[in-house]
Image (tube, rainbow, N blue to C red):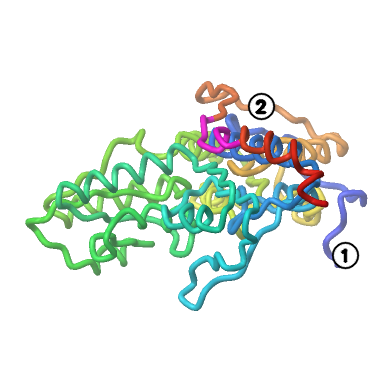
Amino acid sequence: MSPDRPTSSEYIPISVRRVVIAEPHGPCGGVNAAVRFTDKLLRIVAGRESVYTFNEVVHNHKTNKRFEERGLVMIRDRTLDGERDYSKLPRNSLYLSSAHGYKDSDVQAAIERGCIVFITECPLVKKEKKRAVKAIEKGGEIVYFGKAGHPEPRAVSSVAPPDKFHIVTSQEDLDKLRINPLTNYTFLNQTTMSQKDIRGLKDRAMEIIPLVDVGAKEDGCYATDNRQQAVAALMYGADALLVVGSGDISNNTVNLAKVGQYVMKPTYIVNGSDEINWLAFQRNSGIEELVLTSGASCDENDFQEVVAEFEKRGVEVVHQQSLVVENDTEFPIEATRNLILLEERYKNWLSSQK
């Protein structure tokens, strides 16, 4: 550990007097469903064999590491054109499709290899795919605001012809599109994008595209909206923002951090309590009130460990009055249907291994 980054076990005086926990924070319905299903699947498998996936179950390092320690194997091999290399997926194995979405060809390739397929696609991603299909069937085209290379736009783009699907990452990309004034366009976005950026792109789309359907506010992810709005309501009265999540792979975590950056407040992202750089909060740092939140892929236990570290230092921890009421949502997912296939598989497991 670098000497200029004290560990959580080292004590240095800090200026923080109050931590305000943004409410709501943390896991969304899609993440809850995918994580709980994967946990259940690995308990049923109980070490008999590995479960394979081509993409993280959720974009959080700590959660994925825990699953990998229990037998989840992520296949990182890709073909020359950057697609998943299904020749690396063992035949007759267990295949887990992540919450971020899938192409129909993904499932077909796994089935052709004799695999049992478990689909944990978030219903909100599925909804975006359906909107895209509907737009294409009506002769329209898609303008999609998302992060190139992310599995979610990969999934949504798969339902549209390449020349009818236009991915943009900024207003500059949007301005460069060659718009046909007689064509109907549907604006879609990755569910984890910044709400401020989405509003800006929608407004610009309505300015430059004569025929465009930007959808309703509720077309996006409720968790993305709620978590960003909760933080925004606190930032003007706070000195800094700390987001718990995996900022290098989690788009919703990065965009949650942008809320603090937009108002020019110091903003930090950590995977867990062991990554807190206490020197950033040392005495005379000017940070007395800190807003604390977590990305939609962050495990609540990891978040609470961060809370506990501040409490150990005598910091007052309070909860923001929740801006909205969220139940402990777990979305229904397709994956549960195929669990019954494991009962027969393992009933004869010992004899099949002889």
Q: Amino acid at mark 2?
A: His
**In the depicted view, which residue is nearer to us: 101 or 233?**
101
Q: Dot 2 corresponds to which residue?
A: 319
Residue 237 location (% of width, % of height): 58, 37
Please tell me which residue is depicted at 55% across the width and 49% down the height of the picture.
Answer: 97
User: Looking at the rendering, in which quadrant would you find the N terminus?
Assistant: bottom right
Which element type, helix, strand or loop, lies under badge 2? strand
**In the depicted view, which residue is nearer to us: 74 or 51?**
51
Few, some or many residues within 10 Å of mark 1 (<14, 14–19, 20+): few
- Is 165 placed left or right of 308 in the picture? left
Please tell me whether residue 34 is drawn above or below residue 172 in the rendered image: above
Residue, far right: 10
Which element type, helix, strand or loop, lies under badge 1? loop
Q: Nearer the viewer, mark 1 or mark 2?
A: 1
Few, some or many residues within 10 Å of mark 2 (<14, 14–19, 20+): few
Magenta stretch prevailing secondary structure = helix
Q: Dot 1 corresponds to which residue?
A: 1
* Mark found first going from the N terminus, 1 or 2: 1
Q: Which residues are magenta?
A: 331-338
Residue, far left: 182
- Is 201 placed left or right of 240 in the picture? left
Please tell me which residue is depicted at 80% across the width and 35% down the height of the picture.
Answer: 315
Residue 25 location (% of width, % of height): 60, 35
> Is 242 within the magenta?
no
